[in-house]
Each structure stands twice: as structure tokens, then as C-alpha cells.
Amino acid sequence: MSELINKQNSTRSKIRRKISKDESSLWWMYIPALSAVSLFIIYPFLNGIQISFTDWDGFSQESNWIGLDQYKRLFSDPLTWLVVRNTLLYGVGSTFLQLTVGLLYALLLNRSIKFKALTRTIIYLPVIISPLIMGYIWVFFFAYQGGALNDVVVWLGFDPINALGNPSVNPWIIVLVNTYQFVGISMIIYLAGLQGISKDYYEAADIDGASAFQQFKKITLPLLMPSITINVVLNLIGGLKLFDVIVSLTGGGPGNASQSMSTFMYTLYFRREDAGYAATQGVLMTFMILAISLAALIYFKRKEVEA
């Protein structure tokens, strides 16, 4: 009996050693990915932090260490708060619209309707277009001279609208264009979540006499929380770092009225040759996106558990 027990223990030890060896060998597979992340993300970010403590112009071979002067300039610069406000508008506004419109699309296209596959394709199609090109496409619609919108407005007998030149309007146009382009991603993620919900729940709710709204509130929405979490985080990150659409639609203008933090960094570095200050703006942008995204992720993950 003791020999049998010893053999079993020996076998178990061999299995554990084999599993441990296999798991340790898997770590080698992470090296290429970790190397790429370190080379193209971590190193540039750390280098950017170092540059933010200098007065480097971005082109010369020399730079001077100036300590926290760039950060003092950052928090005293009125443009900082303008671009932060715009960045939050692009991030939160785009996220809200994409979540709402994407969910409506998904609920509609999850039903048995005609041309469902074609409709999904049409909604998703803008995603594959470059954001820069998408911005130029919409310029032809909103342009003050020769734009499709103003052609209709003038034909109706009204004065043309300078939508892209109006600082109180063009940030919202950017939000709408960004939403139009990427709402298809939200729709697809929602559709995947909806198709994973068993029909048994709805059949039981029908038997209990629950209305369509009650079924949506008590069944669909709670079980869609993982999809909502993914959409919120992806849309927030995408909106907060928005760049291409702004460049092609407004160029950050008029003046700096529609600048985001990413376009402002570009302006500082390449047009004003102020790389040190651009790096400081980049550090602020990175930590802002990280903080907002992590807060949203933690909040909605808790909602998943509660649901």
C-alpha cells in the first residue's frame, strides 16, 4: 500500500514539474510583444517625460534643463484649459453618442428584417475609411463656399452657414463626424452581446407578462454590461486622442477654437518649434486618458458584477 502511495506521489510530482516547465516556457512567447511595446510605447513616453523638463525646440542638437518651468507654463496657459475642455468634449460626447446610436442600431439589426446584412455593411463601412479622408469628405458637405449644405440653404433662400468657422459649432460637428465614422464598431460589439443572450429569458418574461421596456431594462441591459464596458473604454480612448478628423475638418481653428490636446501638441512641435512644451502637453494628455479610462473601466466592471 505504501509503495502505491509513493508511486502516486511521484507521478503527481512529475506532472507538477512538467506543468511548471510548460508554463515557464510560455513566458518566452511574450518577449516579442514586450519588446515591441517597450520600443515603441514605453521608451518614447519616458523620453517624452525627459524632454518636458527641457526647452528643446525639436530640431537642434542642444537643449537646456529648465526643471518644472514647462509645467508651470502648462497650468498657467489659458490654451491648456481650452484644449482640455475640447478633448473632454470629443471623448465624452463621442462616447455617449456612439453608445446610444450603436445600441439602437444593434437592437434593430438583431431582429429579423429585410436587407439586414446589407444594412450592417453600410453602417460599418465608414470604419474602414481613413479618419483623415473622412474629415475631407465632410468638408465638402459643411464648406462655406460650395458645400452641399450651403447649396441647399441658399437654394431655400437663406444666408449660407459658416459651420466650420463658428467656434461654438465646429467642435460639435467634429463629435458628430467621429460618431458617424465609428458607431459601426459599437454596433458590432453590441450585436455580439445581444446574440449571446439566451432567448429563454425573454420567453419566461413574456409568460410573466413583462413589457418590451421591462424586458430591455431587466434582461437586455444588465446582460449587455460587458459589451457596454468594452464600448465605453474603446470610445473614450479613441475620442480623447482624436487627431485626424480635426486636422482635416477645421485644422484646429478658427484660431485654436477646436484644438484637441493631440492637435495642440502637433502645432507646438512642428509649427512653433516648442518641443519641450509639446512634450509637457503630451504627459498631461497621457495621464488624463489613463485616469479617465481606468475610472470608467473600474466603474463599469462593478456594474457587470451587480448586474
Image: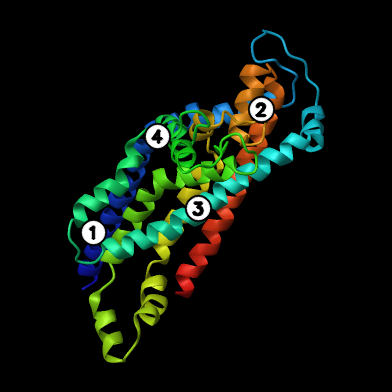
Quarter occupied by residue 100: bottom left
Residue beneath label 4, please? 33
Spot occupied by residue 150 in the image (x, y as percentages of width and height): 48, 37
Q: Amino acid at mark 3?
A: Thr
Q: Nearer the viewer, residue 49 or 90?
A: 90
| Residue 135 image position (x, y, % from top left) | 45, 33
Rendered residue at 34%/59% (across/down): 105
Mark 4 vs mark 2, CA separation in Å:
26 Å
Are the residues tagged 4 and 1 within 8 Å (C-beta)? no
Name the residue rendered at 67%, 42% in the picture: 84
63 vs 115, nearest the viewer: 115
| Residue 290 seen in this snapshot | no
Q: Which mark is residue 95?
A: 3
> Which label is found at residue 279?
2
Q: Nearer the viewer, mark 3 or mark 1?
A: 3
- The 10 Å Cα crowd at callout 4, few under 14, some 14 to 19, many 20 or more, is few
Which of the two marks, 3 or 4, is nearer to us in this view?
A: 3
Q: Residues within 10 Å of mark 3 (few under 14, many from 20)?
A: many
Task: Count neighbours of disc 2 (C-alpha within 10 A) and say few if under 14, some if 14 to 19, many if 20 or more.
Answer: many
Answer above or below: position of 81 versus 111. Answer: above
**Can you say whether 304 is above or below 252 in the image?**
below
Residue 187: percent from the left, percent from the top?
35, 55
Q: Nearer the viewer, mark 3 or mark 2?
A: 3
Quarter the C terminus occupies:
bottom left
Residue 188 as seen in the image, left or right of residue 240: left
* Residue 1 makes an appearance in the image: yes
Camera-near label (4 vs 1) is: 4
Q: Reading the chain from its start, which is encountered first: label 4 or label 1?
A: 1
Residue at the spot x=20%, y=50% of the render? 118
Q: Earlier in the sequence, mark 3 or mark 4?
A: 4
